[in-house]
Image (spheres, grey):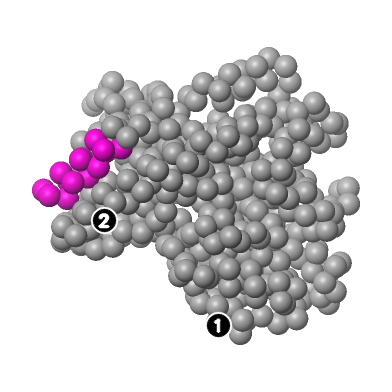
Amino acid sequence: MSTTESAIASAEAHSAHNYHPLPIVVASADGAWMTDVEGRRYLDMLAGYSALNFGHANRRLIDAAKAQLERVTLTSRAFHHDRFADFCTRLAELCGMEMVLPMNTGAEAVETAVKTARKWGYQVKGVPDGMAKIIVAANNFHGRTTTIVSFSTDAEARADFGPYTPGFEIVPFGDLTAMDAAMTENTVAVLLEPIQGEAGVLMPPAGYLAGVRELTRQRNVLFIADEIQSGLGRTGKTFACEHEGVVPDMYVLGKALGGGVVPVSAVVSSAGILGVYRPGEHGSTFGGNPLACAVALEVIAMLRTGEFQQRAAELGDHLHHELGVLAGGGAVETVRGRGLWAGLDIVPSHGTGREISERLMDRGVLVKDTHGSTIRLAPPLVISKEDLDWGLDQLRAVLAD
Ligand SMILES: *Cc1c(COP(=O)(O)O)cnc(C)c1O
């Protein structure tokens, strides 16, 4: 057996099979490239589902992490530490908001948003106890906890995990009339991904996010934007909501906030909304720890320059132009996305998404399929134009086979 085969066999034997990874065993990575245990190099066109927007082993992020590792890594929130205030202040500034509630994973931040909206509903809006409702969209992906899968429409994500948490209404993504009809005086929030990532980079119709903003404002309902994957530069702006000039009441952030180094997530909102919490009502041992804050502070500093957003916009225009040409060639049914983010539906006769992903891997390009015949492209924002073009050449070659 090769080193790769034996590593995969042991992983299969000793880890739960809740993922179906491509048969590659990574040993190291730098920028947009990963190297496997056999020394083969691969262009990373997935970037940890956007957690690696700034690339692997980003020097600034690694240096910030190393410096913090030598000082203090964890205090718990029982004590203040000297990176916490800066992290919250800078992140609130980046978001144009007032307050931050830090957590670790994306799912925890979504849970925090749900709890915050409910508490706000009871304490500020005056919803009767236990009656709060949150509207979500079909085909959503917000994480994997029992409450979050309760409002998933994906059978795989949901089946056999009940009983499910009540209090959620599902409406079709992109349908304002259905959202309007679903709202009652007990609706406390609308929770949406501005672009649905896991569903296949599904774009809402033009005007939808602005319409949701209008409707939620009229009905005194919070607009919660889950920008865990779409935010922090990916689409060519800091937030995907910006493309429609929309400012939600709450951002939910994760993935790239930790620079691919440590898990860092947060809910960012106004003082009127996050101000509902009193000591003891919510928390996390690791949320807002010094190491997380030090890395995230560097991420925020990098985003403040705007250079990554601009790069994503420029390279994204190029990517979508090339994919548009490819879509005219007969192997690709549809192309969607914005910035350095694309979902491609492959014509089924050319192979399943999995098969295309495996053939790309054989040519040194890593992507991931989703929902059958769709593949997703989300290279790190630091990718060079030459590497992006090389990756697209491999895609063309695979689809021509
Ligand atoms: C990845 C993701 C999550 C969940 O984040 P985890 O860190 O995996 O828990 C939630 N929402 C969106 C939009 C995501 O892409």
Query: What residue sits 55% from the left and 78% below the top?
Result: 176
User: In the image, is residue 398 part of the stretch drawn in magenta?
Assistant: yes
Q: Quadrant of the N terminus?
A: top left
71 relative to 29, above or below: above
Q: Nearer the viewer, mark 2 or mark 1?
A: 2
Query: What residue sits 88% from the left and 52% below the top?
Result: 278
Magenta segment boundaries in residue numbering = 388-401
The one of 1 and 74 positioned closer to us in this rendering: 74
Residue furthest out toward the top: 70
Say if residue 193 shows up in the picture.
no
Residue furthest out toward the left: 401
**Label 1 environment density (alpha carbons within 10 Å; few <14, some 14–19, many ≥20):** few
**Residue 241 drawn at (x, y percent):** 56, 58
User: In the image, is residue 38 part of the stretch drawn in magenta?
Assistant: no
What's the residue type where badge 2 is placed? Gly
Give the residue pinned by disc 1.
177
> For disc 2, does the CB lie below 8 Å from ligand 1?
no
**Residue 287 drawn at (x, y percent):** 72, 39
Say if residue 233 shows up in the picture.
yes
- Image quarter of residue 94: top right
- Disc sitting over residue 322 in the figure: none
Give the residue pinned by disc 2.
324
Q: Secondary structure at mark 1?
A: helix
Quote the CA–CA distance across marks 2 and 1: 31 Å
